[in-house]
Image: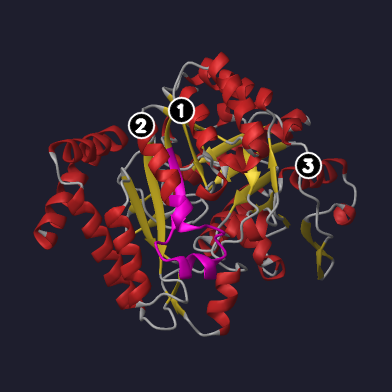
């Protein structure tokens, strides 16, 4: 049986891009750079299906920058028996149109996967275009479903799927998360355009993205994956498995850096982190970077990480207001976070902080606290965004209940109890500009432009020059 796995195109106003499959926060953007998140679930699924005797191909139209016409030509040429799409809330309707075209052209079965259909299983299957959905952490559910289709058996006993049973919609029982991650094969990277998955945060290019764990036990109310997919549970690969996959990636793709896109890389605990760092130090000779939570990061961990090649860490800080952190369920003490950041500074680890503005309890006072925090912290880079309420997250439930949602074109924007959306957006620009003014130096300008060129060639360089001039005209 032939299976086509797809990250379908996202096109807006003749621009092609977007952060879709593989992204925690699906949103349109990134079209000016040659970079996309690696679609881990699709790649793991492709590897699992291939192990089970399926003829698998993959098209990542977002990473490859295919428009709909280009994608449809390549997809039709594959002539699949089953067409699998990882969809998102902002792209669901467009993805349905593409699936409908594929169904009419090839007669294939259609399967949608990902957080959106997990959030809205019955509403998704109402569409006549869809035959099946696979929910949550879907690799094994998809495998069992396709085995059932291939063997012409009834799929109704398979956990973690949705289907149409005559005129009824059936959502089967919830499937347990994969307990032993080491049993998964390496992602089928050979099916994907690996030169298109450059992590823009990383310090070296080309780089490659990996996962050493899945999930997070913290309760950030805005996080789609934590609440909808991983159920606030955490599992990790063994140190041997992580190093083995790193070696495989280096052998086949020759990256200059490996970036671990885990939700919370250091949540495995100090002893396991020291064991992992020891293995990396013994066997790997290129730098690496990761994303994690300050509260589960110790000085002993950071020292071992730096000694084994860790050169940069992306920390999910999210706010400089302790009140907002408490309300969002972050589980973070700002005083401890400051210590962690100072340890990174002392060790020479590049420090990247993320921040989200506009949660329901945001006020002018909390925004000022966040601005003051970033003005004082010695970070190398700050990534600021405005909150979007993704379906079935606690944030979405609160915003819907209290009528805070202001619908955008496809995103669910919100106001806070005290501030309008306009006021939140203005604060976003003010805090971003305050941070950027601190970075004005020969080194800062060089790094800004160099990374634009590294990730987007001359087009990326030109984009950053234009954006820099535009920003300077407004802010200086």
Dot placed on the residue nearer the N-terminal end, 2 or 3: 3
Residue 473: x %, y % from top left = 9, 59
The C terminus lies in quadrant: bottom left
Q: Secondary structure at mark 3?
A: loop
Magenta residue span: 313-337
| Residue at mark 2 | 348
- 2 vs 3, front mark: 2
In this rendering, position of residue 378 left or right of residue 124:
left
Give the image location of residue 160, x and y in percent.
78, 55
* Of residues 18 and 221, the one drawn nearer to the viewer in this rendering: 221
1 and 2 marks in contact (CB < 8 Å): yes
How far is the residue under mark 2 from the one under mark 3?
36 Å
Of circles 1 and 3, the one toward us is: 1
Is residue 79 in view? Answer: no
Q: Is residue 202 magenta?
A: no
- Kindly indicate whether the residue at mark 3 contacts the one at mark 2 (C-beta within 8 angstroms): no
Q: Is residue 109 above or below residue 91?
A: above
Would you name the residue on which mark 1 appears? 306
Residue for point 50% across, 60% down = 91
Q: Residues within 10 Å of mark 2 (few under 14, many from 20)?
A: few
Residue 380, compared with residue 309, is above or below; it is below
Where residue 261 sits: x, y (%)?
52, 40
Can residue 458 be spotted in the picture? Answer: yes
Circle 2 — which element? Answer: loop
Query: Which part of the image, by quadrant, shows the N terminus?
Result: top right
Q: Earlier in the sequence, mark 1 or mark 3?
A: 3
Identify the residue at image location x=64%, y=39%: 269
Instruction: Tell me the element at label 1.
Output: helix
Task: Report the residue marked by disc 3.
Answer: 179
Q: Position of residue 72 (x, y in %)?
A: 50, 46
Q: Specify the label residue 77 is tagged with.
A: none
């Amino acid at each position: 049986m032939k299976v086509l796995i797809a990250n379908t195109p996202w096109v807006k106003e003749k621009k092609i891009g977007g952060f879709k499959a593989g992204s925690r926060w699906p949103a349109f953007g990134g079209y000016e750079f040659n970079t996309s998140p690696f679609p881990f679930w699709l790649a793991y699924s492709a590897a699992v299906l291939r192990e089970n005797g399926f003829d698998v191909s993959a098209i990542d139209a977002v990473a490859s920058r295919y428009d709909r016409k280009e994608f449809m030509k390549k997809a039709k040429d594959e002539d699949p028996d089953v067409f699998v799409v990882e969809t998102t809330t902002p792209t669901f309707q467009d993805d349905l149109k593409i699936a409908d075209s594929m169904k009419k052209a090839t007669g294939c079965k259609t399967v949608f996967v990902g957080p959106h259909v997990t959030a809205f299983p019955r509403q998704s299957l109402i569409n006549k275009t869809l035959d099946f959905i696979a929910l949550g952490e879907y690799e094994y559910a998809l495998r069992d479903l396709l085995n059932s289709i291939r063997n012409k058996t009834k799929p109704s006993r398979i956990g973690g799927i949705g289907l149409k049973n005559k005129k009824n919609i059936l959502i089967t029982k919830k499937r347990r998360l994969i307990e032993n991650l080491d049993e998964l094969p390496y992602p089928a990277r050979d099916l994907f355009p690996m030169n298109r998955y450059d992590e823009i945060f990383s310090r070296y290019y080309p780089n490659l993205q990996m996962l050493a764990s899945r999930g997070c036990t913290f309760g950030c109310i805005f996080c789609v994956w934590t609440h909808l997919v991983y159920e606030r549970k955490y599992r990790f690969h063994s140190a041997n498995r992580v190093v083995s996959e790193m070696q495989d990636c280096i052998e086949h793709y020759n990256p200059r850096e490996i970036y671990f896109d885990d939700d919370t890389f250091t949540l495995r605990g100090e002893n396991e982190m020291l064991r992992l760092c020891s293995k990396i130090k013994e066997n790997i000779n290129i730098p690496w970077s990761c994303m994690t939570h300050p509260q589960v990061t110790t000085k002993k961990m950071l020292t071992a990480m730096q000694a084994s090649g860790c050169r940069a860490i992306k920390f999910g800080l999210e706010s400089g207001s302790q009140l907002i952190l408490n309300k969002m369920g972050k589980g973070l003490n700002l005083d401890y976070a400051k210590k962690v950041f100072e340890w990174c500074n002392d060790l020479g680890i590049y420090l990247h902080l993320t921040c989200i503005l506009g949660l329901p309890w945001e006020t002018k006072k909390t925004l000022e606290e966040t601005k003051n925090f970033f003005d004082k912290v010695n970070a190398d880079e700050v990534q600021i965004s405005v909150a979007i309420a993704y379906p079935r997250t606690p944030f979405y439930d609160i915003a819907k209940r209290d009528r805070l949602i202001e619908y955008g074109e496809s995103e669910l924007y919100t106001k806070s109890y005290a501030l309008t959306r306009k006021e939140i957006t203005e604060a976003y620009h003010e805090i971003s500009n305050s941070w950027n003014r601190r970075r004005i130096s020969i080194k800062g300008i060089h790094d800004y432009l160099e990374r634009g060129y590294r990730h987007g060639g001359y087009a990326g360089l030109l984009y950053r020059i234009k954006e820099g001039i535009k920003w300077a005209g407004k802010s200086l």
